[in-house]
Image (cartoon, rainbow, N blue to C red):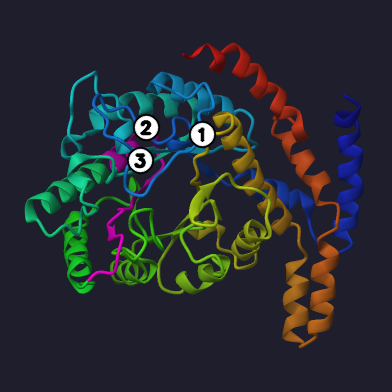
Amino acid sequence: MARKTNLPQAYRLARERYAALGVDTEKTLRTLARVPLSLHCWQGDDVGGFEPAAAELSGGLVATGNYPGKARTPAELRADAARALALIPGKHRFNLHASYGEFGGRRVDRNEVAPEHFKGWIAWARSLGIGLDFNPTCFSHPKAASGFTLSHADKAIRRFWIEHCQASREIGATMGKALGTPAVTNVWIPDGMKDTPADRRGPRERLAEALDTVFARKLNPKNNLDAVEGKLFGIGAESYTVGMHEFYLGYATRRQILLCLDAGHYHPTENMADKISSVLCFVPEILLHVSRGVRWDSDHVVTLTDELLGIAQELVRGDYLGRTHLGLDFFDASINRVAAWVIGARNLLRALCFAMLEPYPRYRELERDGDYTSRLALMEEAKTLPWTAVWDYHCLRQDVPVGEAWLADVKRYEREVLSRRQ
């Protein structure tokens, strides 16, 4: 209680300190409160989905750990997600894969999924006043067992996945129309080879042709926004990825659709933040999947790293938040899954708070004057400004737990709900 009582005073002092540098903390709080993040369904159940006869997880995806209490039904997943959303400041979104529909115990193949299978999700999102995003599920299926989907050499299999992606776009558009906010429907495929291919050209030409068919039908952008996502490699596809970054960069530029940049999908020495301003010179908007790569795995819970701060700084300094859709993408089955959502989301918002509080107009002024010494000095001083007092006050204003207090809520939920799941 003492900490909560002292927050307004700490914020007032921080506000005065930032004002001396020309930074309006009230503007930061207003802007931060309007930034929506899209929480990903697959953290809640280890990428399992709810198909009656789900295939073993494939496509280079591996969920490790066996922490108790994972969601087993759509109702449980919705309850878990709602608990997480209640602990994150702001109004956010939820991101679904096609395999998370409610199929009534019937086998509905991927090319037959329809909006009716997501009525429950739409009703839930409407009750919370949030938007939904969507993804075709081009993995964990017999027709993806070869490691190829939209780029498959077999025309019939290629057609199956084209129909699935087309159906997914229609579902996304239905969600967007029903909820009054466009769904971002993001296409990611695992296609690739474990060892060196003889033919790199053929699969990529087939993929481009298949995507042209997927996106042939124009959808109202008020309801649905299309995105494509590349990857460096996947488990089982270490030597060749059909849809690598350069392929999708060219494709998104040609079609003027969203390019998805995933923080875990590049070489460890690449700076994803540096790609943002480059890509946005040529595409209208981007989708960012904020993740954390560790060695060869791309999907660890987001922590407050220099890489994350760099992404936030690029978005704020370049004034790109209005052209960027932010989502989380990781799955960790070794810790409490609700906590993983909360940790990742709060860290991304924390990074944005830090970036918004930088006196970056002053950085630019010094840079234009060629005073790189002062620019570096000010950038370093800004790292220890009292930005955490502003973040804590933001949580207080948004009526969510301040500091680590949210963890007690998650632990209580674990005792009362998650621990009872067998």
The boundaries of the magenta stretch are 171-197
Q: In the figure, residue 403 lies in which quadrant?
A: top right
Residue 10 appears left or right of 322: right
Q: Measure the alpha-carbon separation of dots 2 and 1.
A: 14 Å
Toward the viewer: 8 or 240?
Answer: 240
Residue 125 x/y as whole percent? 43, 29
Please check the rendered image and state whether residue 235 is part of the magenta-colored stretch, yes or no: no
Q: Are marks 2 and 1 in contact (CB under 8 Å)?
A: no
Q: In the figure, residue 9 lies in which quadrant?
A: top right
Q: Measure the alpha-carbon separation of dots 3 and 2.
A: 24 Å
Q: Is residue 312 above or below residue 348?
A: below
Disc on res. 176: 3
Q: Are marks 3 and 2 in contact (CB under 8 Å)?
A: no
Residue at 25% x, 51% y is 219
- The residue that mark 1 highlights is 65
Instruction: Report whether residue 402 is seen.
Output: no
SS class, disc 1? loop
Dot 2 or dot 1, earlier in sequence: 2
Instruction: Report whether residue 202 is seen.
Output: yes
Residue 200 x/y as whole percent? 23, 72
SS class, disc 3? helix
Q: Are marks 1 and 3 in contact (CB under 8 Å)?
A: no
Please check the rendered image and state whether residue 190 is part of the magenta-colored stretch, yes or no: yes
Q: Is residue 276 above or below residue 71?
A: below
- The residue that mark 2 highlights is 48
Q: Nearer the observer, disc 3 or disc 2?
A: 2
Q: Nearer the observer, disc 1 or disc 3?
A: 1
Dot 3 or dot 2, earlier in sequence: 2
The residue lying furthest to the bottom in this view is 370
